[in-house]
Image: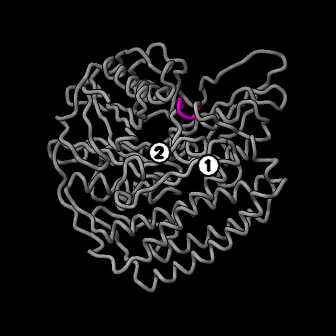
């Protein structure tokens, strides 16, 4: 850990003046040194300071000591620094994003091109002029997919360089879904932004709105009751189960295993109906708000949900037996789309993609919050790193989540009310909040100004970290393997593009 950096914790508000201000070159050296020590970059971004310069903020996670390290630097808009992406691959997208938004040039960057075409950015290119990687040769050809896709798939473009069916390289062009979400957090009443947080990613409603609520609570000094904390965790684990079932159903459909597609899909609907019973919405919208939750879980409801889990567990055991023991299924998912442990670490991959490659990265264990502070989580792990491992990780996490839910729902009378009134946020405060969504950790950083207004807000979804994993996984595979490989990661363009 770098002594020049400030050590803090998840969901703890600190005065902004306590954050060390380094020279930009020292900040980058500190990032590289800490990554060598095993820390991970979870946020790296810039914002316009009061003096007109650009403040660059770096937040790293120490998964062993369960701390965060924070430091900042200032530079002029359009400034320059030596890129560290050649040696620290996980920084390549963060550096590109800073360049896109403020024109701060990472000299020597190996892959300097647009990320999401930020609104009002100094450096901006038209999507039609995106500089794709090129390769020459009579037997090498390009295949394009998107940005318009069939069904309900989000807009995003995939460009394959192939030799026959074999994929040499996949490049993913994003930015089509950019809505300017982060700027919207800083306009209007900051206490009324929960619905915006719920809309960052429609399949990660609970993960994002909980991270937002933690930020508001930390900066306003509101303490949430044990009862509300448990209800929040129940909703988060229900969301995890539902989306893992959705992924398993989609993978089954992609390979033509219809019993899996129908059964996993049916069980997903059962879980979403349970969320509806608890929150009034199948996706959990309107449940979590700063200060607690808006819906309680009565004893009769808890008993009903426990009976549902008995049925779900029974059916899951049956369909899992078929899916993971069918020779045809295994021949299609084993050894496909492999990402090694070393590659996953160097690329900064998180969540289920990391855990399927042997990296125990899980915010519930690394940076515990809410009920997870007492109910510690041991991340489930596999090392194969292929499509089969990403499917199996989903099953293992579903089983782990059901066990947690049974434990919480079997508790006696939960104490405390369900919501405390929010208070005025502290002036000139800084807080990082991270919550383990079903894809991986969602991270929000909030900063208030001198009048307690929400001055800057930053969101990093696991999809921002993990789209590169799909690129790595496709190398050496056939182009016809892409739909299944893509589904095994199940990433979001809207959560990346914001």
Label pair 1/2, CB-CB below 8 angstroms:
no
Residue neighbourhood size for the residue with mark 2, other residues' Cα within 10 Å, grouped as few (<14), some (14–19), many (≥20): many
Residue 466 at x, y = what percent?
A: 55, 39
Residue plotted at (62% across, 67% down): 268
Residue 38 seen anywhere in this rendered image of the structure: yes
Q: Please count the marks in the image.
A: 2
Q: Which residues are magenta?
A: 343-347
Residue 469 at x, y = what percent?
A: 60, 36
Identify the image quadrant of residue 18. Answer: top left
Residue 155 seen anywhere in this rendered image of the structure: no
* Left or right of 443 on screen, residue 258: right
Residue 342 at x, y = what percent?
A: 58, 31
In depth, the one of 365 and 268 nearer the eye is 365
Q: Is residue 69 magenta?
A: no
Q: Earlier in the sequence, mark 1 or mark 2?
A: 2
Dot label at residue 490: 1
Magenta stretch, main secondary structure, is: helix
**Residue to which mark 2 is pinned:** 461
In depth, the one of 142 and 318 nearer the eye is 318
Instruction: Give the vertical position of 421 relative to 174 (above or below).
Output: below
Residue plotted at (80% across, 53% down): 329
Residue plotted at (65% across, 54% down): 152
């Amino acid at each position: 850990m770098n002594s020049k950096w400030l050590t803090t914790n998840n969901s703890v508000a600190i005065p902004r003046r306590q954050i060390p201000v380094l020279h930009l070159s020292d900040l980058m050296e500190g990032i590289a040194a800490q990554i060598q020590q095993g820390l991970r970059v979870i946020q790296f971004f810039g914002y316009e300071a009061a003096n007109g310069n650009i403040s660059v903020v770096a937040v790293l996670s120490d998964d062993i000591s369960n701390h965060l390290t924070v430091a900042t630097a200032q530079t002029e808009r359009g400034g320059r620094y030596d890129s560290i992406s050649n040696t620290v691959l996980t920084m390549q997208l963060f550096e590109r994003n800073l360049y896109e938004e403020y024109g701060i040039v990472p000299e020597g960057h190996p892959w300097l091109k647009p990320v999401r075409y930020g609104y009002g950015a100094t450096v901006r290119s038209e999507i039609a002029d995106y500089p794709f990687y090129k390769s020459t040769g009579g037997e090498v050809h390009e295949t394009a997919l998107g940005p318009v896709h069939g069904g309900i798939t989000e807009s995003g473009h995939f460009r394959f360089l192939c030799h026959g069916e074999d994929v040499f390289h996949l490049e993913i062009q994003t930015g089509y879904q950019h809505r300017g979400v982060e700027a919207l957090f800083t306009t209007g009443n900051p206490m009324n932004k929960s619905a915006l947080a719920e809309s960052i990613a429609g399949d990660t409603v609970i993960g994002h709105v909980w991270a937002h609520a933690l930020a508001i609570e930390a900066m306003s000094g509101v303490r949430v009751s044990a009862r509300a904390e448990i209800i929040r965790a129940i909703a988060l684990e229900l969301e995890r189960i539902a989306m893992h079932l959705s992924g398993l159903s989609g993978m089954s459909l992609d390979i033509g295993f219809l019993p899996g597609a129908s059964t996993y899909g049916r069980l997903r609907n059962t879980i979403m109906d349970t969320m509806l019973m608890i929150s009034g919405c199948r996706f959990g919208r309107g449940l979590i708000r700063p200060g607690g939750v808006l819906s309680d879980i009565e004893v009769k409801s808890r008993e009903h949900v426990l009976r549902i889990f008995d049925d779900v567990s029974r059916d899951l055991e049956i369909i899992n037996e078929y899916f993971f023991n069918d020779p045809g299924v295994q021949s299609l998912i084993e050894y496909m789309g492999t990402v090694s442990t070393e590659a996953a670490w160097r690329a900064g991959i998180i969540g289920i993609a990391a855990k399927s490659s042997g990296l125990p990265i899980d915010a519930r264990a690394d940076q515990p919050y809410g009920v997870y502070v007492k109910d510690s989580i041991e991340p489930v792990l596999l090392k194969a790193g292929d499509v089969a491992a990403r499917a199996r990780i989903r099953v293992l996490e579903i089983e782990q989540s059901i066990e947690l839910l049974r434990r919480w729902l079997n508790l006696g009378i939960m104490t405390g009310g369900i919501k405390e009134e929010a208070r005025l946020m502290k002036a000139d405060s800084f807080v990082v909040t991270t919550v383990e969504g079903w894809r991986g950790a969602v991270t929000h950083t909030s900063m208030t100004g001198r009048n307690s207004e929400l001055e800057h807000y930053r969101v990093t979804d696991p999809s921002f970290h993990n789209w590169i994993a799909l690129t790595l996984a496709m190398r050496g595979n056939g182009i016809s393997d892409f739909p299944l490989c893509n589904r095994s990661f199940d990433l979001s363009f809207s959560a990346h593009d914001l």
